[in-house]
Image: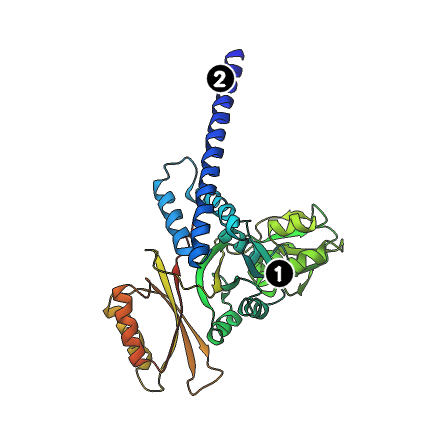
Amino acid sequence: MAEAQNTLADLRVSIDAVDDALLALICKRAALAKSVGHLKEDHKAPIWRPEREAQIIQRLRQANTGPLAGDRIESIWREIISGCREIERRLRVAFLGPSGTFSEIALLKQFGHGVEPVSCSSIDEVFRTTEAQQADFGIIPVENSSEGAVNRSLDLMLQSALVISAEVSLPVKHNLLSLHHDLENITKVCAHPQALAQCATWLDKHMPAAQRIPVSSNAEGARLASQAPDTAGIASELAAARYGLNITCGSIQDDPHNRTRFAVIGRYACAASGMDQTSLILSVPDKAGAVHSLIEPLARHGVSMKRFESRPARQGTWEYYFYIDILGHQSDASVAAALEELRQRAAFIKIIGSYPRAHEA
């Protein structure tokens, strides 16, 4: 036992020494970031460059030899970068609130805690707040692996002058939150309609008699649950902490691999990072073979298509708009060649951003 205690004491001394070295290096990094900030200010350069941050994270992931997983390394460095960026200026980022939503979790995953979150009541308000420069950037849900595209986000991207500067892929873990530790006496479940749909099978099996009440957000459902003993919400662990609730049942989503993809919107157009994708909105003339003609240049130039969505046109003379994600940056030679041909063939084309692809664990 004495030998074990000596070994533990020695290990703790070693850990303290590593912590001291880490602190010194982090402070050195912050000082360098402060110098970079002065140069940016002199040249009126942007504070946040997502392509540069993506390159840093990618390099560290590749250099990582463990035992920490790549996702854990990324989350640590995101916070270090966030703290260093905050020395220059604290960015304001609009998100779909209230506090405790998955949109806020996505915001923190991308930007870290060194920003000022701006809660908005709707996706429309996220766009308006960012367009009015009351926030530097906004973050919006784009698609869910179970429920598909978030149509309001797609429609507003068509109308807005904002572009996508980054994306966040977030695993969605739904939890049943209440003031209780068990299901007894819970007669109502409040959540966003998508969350209710994503947990329908679990609810059918475990709470078939409970009334399902759709609300504006999962965080709003958690807030209501915090005020009524007979009510539960479906929301995140962050919401449980924010509203003082118990996780009555965890991971109740029907699809264990459920994910939501978010887009960071703003005015910043990213340079190439080396691991990018480009998002487009297209429409085609009303004639036979038009859609095939539209996507054929992508295949011929070796450009991979990652996503293809259609939305009814609400204006103009075309029936549908097509939302397409392709791999690569619009400045890449193959992508640029394909886009040039698309401009000649499409009735309408709008590039809504080239930006670093998110890591998906």
**Which residue shows up at 39% across the image and 36% down it?**
66
Q: Residue furthest left?
A: 300
Q: Position of residue 135 (x, y in %)?
A: 56, 63
Q: Name the spot of residue 185 as percent of width and height, x first.
A: 75, 53
In the rendered image, the vertical position of residue 150 relative to residue 222, given as above or below: below
The three-letter amino acid code for the residue at tag 1 is Ser
Going by the image, does 245 lie left or right of 194?
A: right
Q: Amino acid at mark 2?
A: Thr
- The answer to which of 173 and 269 lies nearer the viewer is 269
Q: Secondary structure at mark 1?
A: strand
The residue beneath circle 2 is: 7
Q: Residues within 10 Å of mark 1 (few under 14, many from 20)?
A: many
Q: Is residue 172 visible?
A: no
Question: In the rendered view, does 96 fall on the left or right side of 330?
Answer: right
**What colour scheme does the image use?**
rainbow
Q: Secondary structure at mark 2?
A: helix
- Quadrant in which the N terminus appears: top right
Q: For the point 43% across and 40% down, which residue is it? A: 69
Q: Residue furthest top?
A: 2
Instruction: Name the residue that disc number 1 marks.
Output: 119
Q: Residues within 10 Å of mark 2 (few under 14, many from 20)?
A: few
